[in-house]
Image (spheres, rainbow, N blue to C red):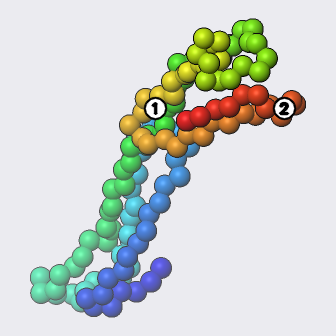
Amino acid sequence: FGTLQIGASIQIKASIRPMKANVLVARAICRLGKTRNEHIQKKDTFLVPKPLLELRLSAIVKFTHIVLSDTRIDFGSVLAYTKSGDADQGTKREILIKNTSPVVANVKVRRIERDRESVFSIIP
């Protein structure tokens, strides 16, 4: 609630916290209280404002959609002490991480098992 002096303006801020992809539409209403013009009987002389000002709010909520070309990498049997640069030994596999949405996605891939020494490496 507040009062605006003649010729003054106020800036408002609207925010949104969507939980799912959707099209959202809402409205905000500014209710005008009694003004000096409403107390004067000669309405043809003075401008009487509308009692409500309406603002339409809309948003198209989009989320990222990441897909993998495969959800599992199986190296099969690999000889001990094989370097990952040896293409003949089949120690490299690739999967494709694709963002199919119209929204930019930040991706981080990391190994989550910590029960043994890390023998796998992941390079973006």
Label 1 sits on residue: 99
Could one spot residue 36 in this view of the protein?
Answer: no
| Front-most of residues 1 and 77 | 77
| Helix, strand or loop at mark 2 | loop
Which residue occupies 86% across, 30% down? Answer: 116
Which residue occupies 25% across, 88% down? Answer: 7
Q: Quadrant of the C terminus?
A: top right
Q: Residue furthest top?
A: 77
| Helix, strand or loop at mark 1 | strand
Three-letter code for the amino acid on which mark 1 is drawn = Asn
Which residue occupies 52% across, 43% down? Answer: 106
Q: Residue furthest left?
A: 44
Three-letter code for the amino acid on which mark 2 is drawn = Glu
Label 2 sits on residue: 117
Q: Dot 2, crowdedness within 10 Å: few (<14), some or many (≥20)? A: few
Could one spot residue 81 in this view of the protein?
Answer: yes
| Front-most of residues 30 and 119 | 119
Which residue occupies 43% across, 29% down? Answer: 100
Which mark is first along the chain, 1 or 2? 1
4 on left or right of 80: left
* Residue 92 in the image: above or below residue 56: above
| Front-most of residues 25 and 51 | 25
Q: Quadrant of residue 94?
A: top right
